[in-house]
């Protein structure tokens, strides 16, 4: 079983923000594979199903971004999910808008949601897909940039990044992370 996690903030207020690229990617997968994300457990909104002959849980933590790990660790412990079967998708200001980067493991960088995930799991050894959102011209405007409204001309670029992240997850499930990294990085 795979645990596929999209990081974001609860959607009612934050659905059209750069910080919700992870949630958008989960929504793309759920729609494509007809998986209903409508159950609540362990501070998360989730659904389960089959993607490319693999049983998956699609999870959107509802703890707000900076506490995402608190939900994820509960799913890992309850379902006994191995670290190699975890994929976390999140936005990244250090990656160009619409571009994705796949890694087998690594640090959190400046991303507070990933800091929480790594702290709670106690390891950096899990797959992650970073969806590029670029960075603001003025670094002091970072909070408004990641949780503020997205200009219309940028929405298509960011939607393309979420779509590529969904395709990368499918590739990982079909052919493994090495092939996915070669194809998408």
Image (cartoon, rainbow, N blue to C red):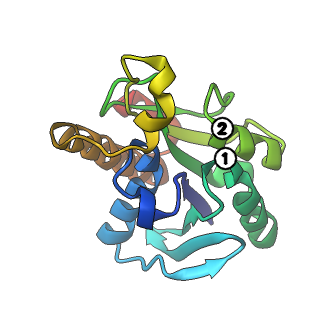
The image shows residue 93 at horizontal and vertical percentages of 46, 27
Relative depth, front residue between 134 and 160: 134
Q: Crowding near pointer 2: few (<14 within 10 Å), some, many (20+)?
A: some
Please indicate, yes or no, whether residue 52 appears anywhere in the rendered image: no
- Assess whether mark 1 and mark 2 are in contact (beta carbons under 8 angstroms): yes
Residue matched to label 1: 66
The image shows residue 27 at horizontal and vertical percentages of 38, 64
Residue ID at (61%, 33%): 111
Using the image, determine if residue 65 lies above or below residue 57. above
Q: Residue 144 appears in which quarter of the rendering?
A: top left
Residue ID at (68%, 70%): 43
Disc 2 element: helix
* Mark closer to the chain start, 2 or 1: 1
Q: Quadrant of the N terminus?
A: bottom right
Residue matched to label 2: 112
- Indicate which disc residue 153 carries: none
Please indicate, yes or no, whether residue 121 appears anywhere in the rendered image: yes
């Amino acid at each position: 079983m795979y645990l596929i996690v999209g990081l974001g903030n609860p959607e009612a207020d934050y659905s059209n923000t750069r910080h919700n690229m992870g949630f958008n990617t989960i929504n793309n997968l759920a729609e494509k594979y007809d998986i209903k994300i409508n159950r609540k457990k362990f501070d998360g909104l989730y659904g389960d199903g089959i993607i490319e002959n693999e049983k998956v849980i699609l999870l959107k933590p509802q703890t707000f971004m900076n506490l995402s790990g608190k939900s994820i660790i509960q799913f890992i412990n309850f379902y006994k999910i191995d670290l190699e079967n975890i994929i976390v998708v999140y936005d990244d200001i250090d990656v160009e808008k619409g571009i994705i980067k796949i890694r087998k493991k690594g640090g959190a960088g400046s991303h507070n949601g990933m800091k929480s995930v790594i702290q709670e799991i106690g390891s950096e050894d899990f797959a992650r897909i970073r969806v590029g959102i670029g960075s603001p011209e003025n670094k002091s405007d970072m909070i408004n940039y990641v949780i503020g409204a997205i200009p219309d001309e940028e929405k298509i670029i960011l939607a393309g990044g979420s779509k590529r992240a969904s395709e990368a997850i499918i590739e990982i499930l079909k052919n493994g992370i090495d092939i996915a990294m070669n194809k998408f990085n």
